[in-house]
Amino acid sequence: MASAHRVRFAPSPTGYLHIGGARTALFNYLYARRFGGTFILRIEDTDLERSTEASLKAILDGLKWLDIDWDEGPDKGGPFPPYFQTQRLDTYRQHIDQLIAAGKAYRCYCTQEELKERRAQAEKEGRTYKYEGTCRERKDAPEGRHHVIRFKMPSQEGSVSFDDLVLGKITKEYSDLDDWVMMRGDGIPLYNYGCVLDDHLMEITLVSRGQEHVNSTFPQLMLYQAFGWQPPQFAHLPLILGPDREKLSKRKHKEADVMLHKANGILPEALLNFVIRLGWSHGNDEVISRQQMVEWFDFKDVGSTSGVWNPDKLLWLNQHYLKTLPPADIARRLAPFLADKGHALPADDARLEHFVIAFRERAKTLEEMATMAVPYLLQGVTLDEKAAAKHLTADSLKLVRQVRDEVAAMPEWTVAGLDSVIKTVSEKAGVGMGKVAQPIRVAITGNTVSPGIGETLLLMGKDEALRRLDAALARG
C-alpha cells in the first residue's frame, strides 16, 4: 500500500541540476522525511532532442552530492514503475483513447503554418490568440496530414480553482483557457498531460514546484476533472533571483549550477543551509542542521516572496561548516582539491587534518584552504629578500641553529612541543618569542605571515622544515 504522503521531484534531463531544482527536491525530501512519507524521483525525458544521458548523470550526481536520497525512482525501482516518461508511452496513449472515446479530447489536424497565420491575424487585431476549436467536431482524417491531440474544454461558463499551500486560493475562468495540446502526433505527451497521468498513477498527494508553473495547474486540474480523479495538493514555490535580482537562470547566472559550487569548494551542508532559506524560514535561524531541517520543514512556512542569491551569505555559512564539522571529515574532502593542484596525499596523511585546523579560521572554501596548504607541500622556498635581510641576520641565525638542533632531536613533532622549544630558546637568549619565531617563519615560509610558529613547522613536516632551516643557515 502506498504511503499517506507521496511527493516527487520530476526534472527534465536537459542540463545540469539547477539550484531551483535542488531546492524543489530538498523541500519535497524534507516534507517526506518529516511526515513519514515517500519521496519519488521521476525523470521527465520526453524532450527527445535535448534529453541526454550526461544530463541525467549530472542531475543524479548533484542529488547524491547533496545527500537528497529518493525512495522510489532510478536505481531504486518502486511499486509504480517505470520512472522514466519515455518508458510510459503506452500508458499515455491508452488514456488518450479513453478521453477521445468519451468526447473529452480530439484529434486536431491544423498545421503549424495555419496556426501561425491565425496567431498573426489575432495580433494584428490586437487580441490574444486562442485556438478556435476548428477540429473539435471533425470526423474525417485528412490524408497526409499529421495530427495532435487536444483537450476539449467545457463549452459552458465556469471556473477552476485550487487552494495553493503557499499562494492561497487561485481561480481562472474556463473562458481564459483554450483546447490545449496534450500529445504530439508521434505519441509523445506534452508536460500538462504527462505529469498529470504520472502523478495520479503514482499516487502523488502533493505537488510542489516553482511559481512559473501556476498557470499550468489550471489545464491540469481540468484533466483531473475529465478523468474523475482527485487532484493532489499544490504548493508553488517562490522564484530564486540572482544577485542582479533577475530570475536565476542557467543562461545568465553561473551560480545556478549546483555542481559548480562543489568544484568551488562549497560544502553540501552549507549549500543546503543556504538554499533552504531562499523562500522558507524558521524564525530568525540562519544556521540550520540537517536534523533541524527535517524537524521543522513544512510547506505552510514557505513564503511567496522571491529569494535573492547572496554570495557573501553562502561563503559565511561555508566557513561556519568548515570550522564546526569534524576536522577529519573536512580533511577527507580537502584531499581532492590538493590532488587537483598536483599534491595527492594518502587519505590517512596526518597533514590533511593539520591543514584544516590551521586554515579553517581564514579559508572560506575548500579551494582556498587547498591554496593555503600548497606552499607547505613544496620542496624548497623562495625567500622574500626584504624579510630575509631583516630577520635572517647573523645574530638571529644563531637562535635558528639552536631551534633546528632541538627540533631535529624530537622523536615526535607536536604543536605544543615545537612551541615549547621556541619558548625555551628565547628565554635562554633573554629575548621575546617573536625574535626567535619570526626568523624561523621567514626561513620556513619565505615571508613574515603564517599560522602560529609551532603549527607552521608541523604543517611543513619534519624533513622539509629541517631542509629549509638548513638552507637559511647556509646563508650565514
Image (cartoon, helix red, strand yellow):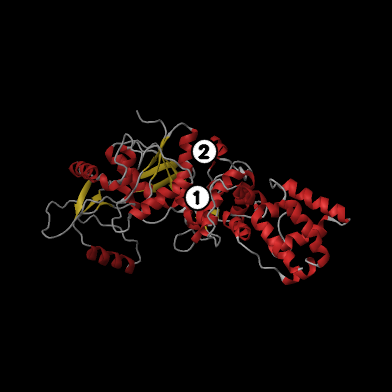
Q: Nearer the viewer, residue 74 or 403?
A: 403
Residue drawn at the location 49% of the way across and 53% of the way down? 239
- Identity, as a three-letter code, of the amino acid under mark 1: Pro
Residue 310 higher or lower than 87, as above or below:
below
Circle 1 crowding by C-alpha within 10 Å: few under 14, some 14–19, many from 20: many
- The amino acid marked with disc number 2 is Asp
Q: Earlier in the sequence, mark 1 or mark 2?
A: 1
Image quadrant holding the C terminus, namely bottom right
- Residue 157: give x, y in percent of width and height: 32, 46
Q: Is residue 144 left or right of residue 346?
A: left
Residue 342 shows in this picture: yes
183 or 32: nearer the viewer: 32
**318 lies left or right of 74:** right
Residue 149 location (% of width, % of height):
22, 51
Q: Residue furthest right?
A: 430
Q: CA distance from mark 1 to mark 2?
A: 15 Å
- The answer to whether 170 is drawn above or below residue 143 in the figure is above
For the N terminus, which image quadrant? top left
Percent x, y of residue 390: 79, 68
Specify whether residue 157 is in view: no
Instruction: Answer with left or right where residue 451 lies relative to residue 59.
Output: right
Where residue 440 sits, quadrant-wise, is bottom right
Of the numbered discs in the image, which one, if any, rests on residue 298? Answer: 2
Residue 356 horizontal/vertical position (percent): 63, 50
Q: In the image, what residue occupies the spot 38% across and 46% down?
A: 10
Count residues near mark 2 (Cα–Cα under 10 Å), then give few for <14, some for 14-19, many for 20+: many
Left or right: residue 163 versus residue 373 is: left
The residue beneath circle 1 is: 238
Identify the residue at horizontal 71%, vertical 52% (top origin): 408
Check disc 1 and report its element: helix, strand or loop: loop
